[in-house]
Image (cartoon, grey):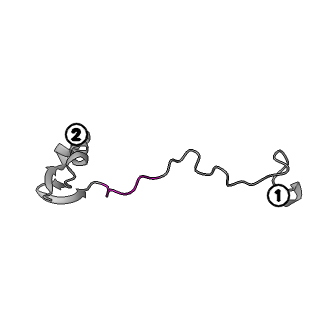
């Protein structure tokens, strides 16, 4: 896998295009300033698909007797006067 070099000026002008290309070919991109490497942009490693966020906690609360009651007694709050 060969790294591609892009100047910081070109990267700034073509950032989205470079990221899209890197995502499709998987090759990292070295960003240079005045010919010297300053950063490397690399694609994320391929991992298993994360579970969906919505519905992740389904069926984890078994019961709650008083859903509209206060979570703490007013005396538990120590407000400074």
SS under mark 2: helix
Estimate the x, y position of residue 51 in percent, counting from the top left. Answer: 49, 51
Residue 33: horizontal and vertical position, in percent?
Answer: 16, 54
Residue numbers of the magenta segment: 44-50
Give the label, 1 or 2, closer to the camera. 2
Badge 1: how crowded within 10 Å, few (<14), some, or many (20+)? few
> Residue at image x 22%, y 52%?
26
Asked whether 72 or 33 is in front, the reply is 72
Query: Which residue: 45% across, 53% down?
Result: 50
| Few, some or many residues within 10 Å of mark 2 (<14, 14–19, 20+) | few
19 inside magenta stretch:
no
Q: Name the residue beneath numbered marker 2.
A: 17
> Of 80 and 76, which appears nearest the observer?
76
Please tell me whether mark 1 sits on a helix, a strand or a loop: loop
Marking on residue 77: 1
Give the distance between the C-alpha atoms of the residues marked 1 and 2, in whole angstroms: 54 Å
Point out the tag, 1 or 2, that comes first from the N-terminus.
2
Could you say where residue 32 lies in the image, as x and y percent from the top left?
16, 55
Q: Does 34 sit left or right of 28 as displayed?
A: left
């Amino acid at each position: 896998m060969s790294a591609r070099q892009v100047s910081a000026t070109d990267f700034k002008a073509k950032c989205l295009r470079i990221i899209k290309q890197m995502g499709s070919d998987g090759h990292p991109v070295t960003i240079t300033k005045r010919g010297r490497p300053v950063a490397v942009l690399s694609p994320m490693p391929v991992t298993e698909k994360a579970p969906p966020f919505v519905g992740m906690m389904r069926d984890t609360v078994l019961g709650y007797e008083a859903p509209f009651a206060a979570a703490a007694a007013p005396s538990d709050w120590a407000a400074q006067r």
